[in-house]
Image (cartoon, rainbow, N blue to C red):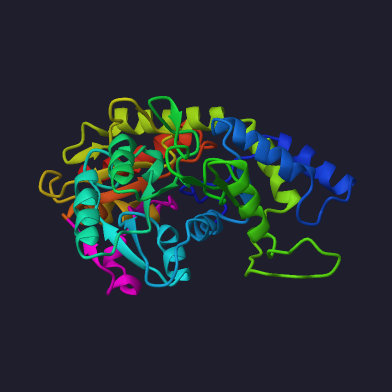
Amino acid sequence: MQNKMWLSSPHMCGREEGYVKDAFDTNWIAPLGPHVNGFEQGLSARMLEHPVAALSSGTAALHLALILLGVERDDVVICQSFTFSASANPIVYQGAVPYFVDSEADTWNMDPDLLEEAISRLVTVGKRPKAVVVVHLYGMPAKMDRITEICERYQVPVVEDAAEALGSALHEKPCGTFGRFGVLSFNGNKIITTSGGGALVCPDDAFAERARFLATQARDTAPHYQHSVIGYNYRMSNVCAAIGRGQLEVLDQRVEQRRKNFAYYQETLSDLPGISFLSETAGSFSNRWLTCMTIDPDHSGGVTRESVRLALETQQIESRPLWKPMHLQPVFANAPAMSTGVSERLFNTGLCLPSGSNLTSEDLSRVVEHIRKNWK
């Protein structure tokens, strides 16, 4: 696998090692420590000074957001269908019911019209949703202006899954700061990584402190171990946070490189019949975490997403279909959903291309070469 080209591999800048060495030199190896505090402060500065709790994963952050919103058994939580399962799983952790809403074609994110219809239907039958989970897919900002207006009108809080969108913005406002809570991820394939980790962007210090309390097993203030509520082992370690501090220093460079990757693919592949790329809508700025294209087999001469994926695989080049919608997943077969077919079409025609910020120009040229061979 030495020569394999990965979809999105970690990219270290060199500063991470110094922060980690400091953690070892000072013996701050156990959970928490000065690097956790420093990482939270750095993230807060990127999130318009919203307080941030550094956690073990983006999934943990979303789970805590639902807990802090009071989501309980049999509550309904509306969730974007076109996403990774981690956007929906925490709803089930709480015993609540995920109600999936399809995407619109402009951003591939939650369809505001469909969202309003879903909320209206639920309110009519006395099941006002407890929250709405909207995702900025592949770093593309959702239509947050309309989504937040609808949710405010119906008094439904928004949880903003920005796991793929650190560095993205809408009208110069960072993704992750539009909803009641924002969720970030630092998984190994994200635009910056802590090897594993996430963060919860909170509306105020009180919520952030509550999140940190729940994330450290909910230990009450006492000389002995005392617990009044159920807690979780969700806090980020000082060592992982040390990596994150180095990564955060080069976030803007990572965004710039990923946007250059997208521009290269778009420039060198758009002439092929049937291929299209997702454009930014007015006022949006995407970090282009992953470059994704769609292939319309009716206009591509029979070339399909799958034939291209398999061709790349023979060359040790990793690519991947777009997310399979949640309403098509076996585990959510019985969950209610409102679908227009948009996400199903995208799943059937879309492909994620190698997009790491550490790809060389030769790497990108190699990907394009083997894609273009499918049309010859």
Q: Position of residue 212 (x, y in %)?
A: 66, 53
Count the marks. Answer: 0
Q: Residue at x 43, y 25 (%)?
A: 172
**Residue 349 sits inside the magenta stretch:** no
Foreground residue, 339 or 253?
Answer: 339
Whether residue 194 is visible here, answered yes or no, is no
> In the drawing, does residue 103 fall left or right of residue 301?
right
Q: Quadrant of residue 41?
A: top right
Q: Position of residue 53 (x, y in %)?
A: 62, 47
> In the drawing, does residue 180 fall left or right of residue 279?
right
Q: Position of residue 312 (x, y in %)?
A: 36, 51
**Residue 336 sits inside the magenta stretch:** yes
Q: Quadrant of residue 259?
A: top left
Foreground residue, 333 or 347?
Answer: 333
> In the drawing, does residue 246 fall left or right of residue 252?
right
Q: Residue furthest left?
A: 298
Residue 245, above or below 111: above
Whether residue 154 is visible here, answered yes or no, is yes
Foreground residue, 151 or 79?
Answer: 151
Q: Residue at x 55, y 44 (%)?
A: 202
Which image quarter is the N terminus in? Answer: bottom right
Magenta span: 314-339
Which image quarter is the C terminus in? Answer: top left
Q: Residue at x 49, y 33 (%)?
A: 167
Residue 65, above or below 294: below
Q: Position of residue 322 (x, y in %)?
A: 32, 52
Residue 118, above or below 243: below
> In the drawing, does residue 251 fall left or right of residue 324?
right
